[in-house]
Amino acid sequence: MNITTVDARGLEPPEPFERAMEALANLKAGEQFTLLLDRMPHPLIRLLDRDGYRHEVNFHDDGTVAILIGRP
C-alpha cells in the first residue's frame, strides 16, 4: 500500500490545516496518509476524533510531529 506524505512543516496557519483537509477529502475508504507538522494540531485531532478517522501521532527527535491518518 502506498502512503502519501503531506509535508506541512514550516507553513503558517491555516495552511497546514487546509492541506490536511484537502488530503482528507481525497482519501478513499481504507487509505491513509502521513501528515508532517511542526507542532501538535489540536483542532485537527478533535476533528479526526469527531469524524471517526483513525490516527496515530509520533514525535520525532527533530521536533516533527508525524500523524498517520486513515479513513475507516
Image (cartoon, rainbow, N blue to C red):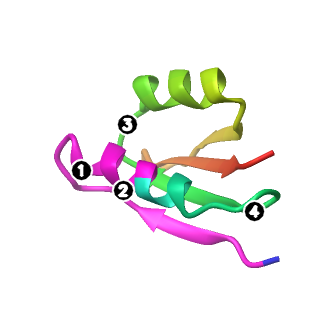
Evaluate if marks 2 and 1 touch, with contact meaning CB atoms under 8 Å apart. yes
Q: Which residue is mark 3?
A: 39
Q: Position of residue 58 (x, y in %)?
A: 63, 42
**Mark on residue 31?**
4
Specify which label sits upstream in the sequence, 3 or 1: 1
The CA distance from mark 4 to mark 1 is 22 Å
Specify which label sits upstream in the sequence, 4 or 2: 2
Q: Which residue is mark 1?
A: 15
Mark 2 neighbour density, 10 Å: few (under 14) some (14–19) many (20 or more) = some
- Kind of residue indicated by mark 1: Glu
| Nearer to us in this view, 63 or 3 | 3
Q: Position of residue 41 (x, y in %)?
A: 42, 32
- Kind of residue indicated by mark 2: Arg
Who's the residue at 37% across and 36% down the image? 39
Residue 36 lies, with reference to residue 59, above or below; the image says: below
Q: Position of residue 72 (x, y in %)?
A: 81, 45
Q: Which residues are magenta?
A: 2-21
Specify which label sits upstream in the sequence, 3 or 2: 2
Image position of 43 (left or right of 3): left
Evaluate if marks 3 and 2 touch, with contact meaning CB atoms under 8 Å apart. no
Mark 1 neighbour density, 10 Å: few (under 14) some (14–19) many (20 or more) = few
- SS label for mark 4: loop
Residue 55 lies, with reference to residue 1, above or below; the image says: above
The CA distance from mark 4 to mark 3 is 24 Å
Image position of 9 (left or right of 12): right
